[in-house]
Amino acid sequence: MNTPAHSLSLAPSPWIDRFAHLVPAGARVLDVAAGSGRHALYFANRGNRVLAVDRDAAMLATFAGASGVEVRTRDLETGTWPFEGESFDAIVVVNYLHRALLPHLLAALAPDGTLLYETFAVGNEAYGRPANPDFLLREGELLDEVRGRLIVVAFEQGLSPDRDRPAVIQRIAAVGRARAWPPPIGR
């Protein structure tokens, strides 16, 4: 059976799907640079309350009104952090990097929250865009950002086998230090 291209574009990243269990049902999720809403819709369908933010109002409009999803058009690269005083149980970032946001994201994460982050890394320039070092994570950069603040559940960097084209990526799944970790084994 053929899957329409649009359906594929709305499938969550395999990394996000793999670690979504770290985000409990009912959690408040911030989807940064939400684009077409694939992760916002994915978490809303899992019973989460999602705030999807992107600077492209037209992209957000394609899924505005979806149950469990609030959309806000914001350019996170200019002006002040728009979520001052807000807290999120989970923050999801895929295919986006603006280094100045990293401290804000970590500060907005609940003490027992989940960070799921996946984006391009140095070396990707050999495979296409992005190639600008401003948009490529340096070796171990996500680890360095969360060190001492979050508990790393999983981390990967290198050539990704699970994307539609070769790409060098860096990924992290981490939880707040207030989270009981490792979780107890279920019965």
Image: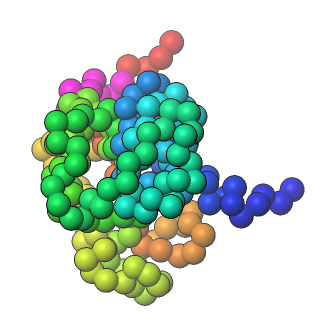
Left or right for 37, reference 52: right
Q: Residue at x 21, y 57 (%)?
A: 101
Q: Residue at x 60, y 70 (%)?
A: 164
Residue 166 sits inside the magenta stretch: no
Q: Residue at x 53, y 76 (%)?
A: 166
Please provide percent x and percent y for residue 22. 41, 34
Residue 116, relative to residue 164: is it above or below?
above
**Front in this rendered view, residue 96 or 147:** 96
**Front in this rendered view, residue 104 or 155:** 104
Q: To which quarter of the image does residue 8 belong? A: bottom right
Residue 42, relative to residue 156: is it above or below?
above
Please provide percent x and percent y for residue 165. 57, 75
Q: How is the image coloured?
A: rainbow
Residue 48, relative to residue 92: is it above or below?
above
Q: Residue furthest right?
A: 1
Q: Is residue 20 visible?
A: no
Please provide percent x and percent y for residue 131. 36, 83
Q: Residue furthest top?
A: 187
Q: To which quarter of the image does residue 175 belong? A: top left
Q: Report the magenta residues as a range.
A: 178-183
Please provide percent x and percent y for residue 106. 20, 45
Q: Which quadrant is the N terminus positioned in? A: bottom right
Left or right for 28, reference 62: left
**Front in this rendered view, residue 45 or 54:** 54
Left or right for 118, reference 66: left
Secondary structure predominantly adopted by residues drawn in magenta: loop
Q: Residue at x 16, y 36 (%)?
A: 85
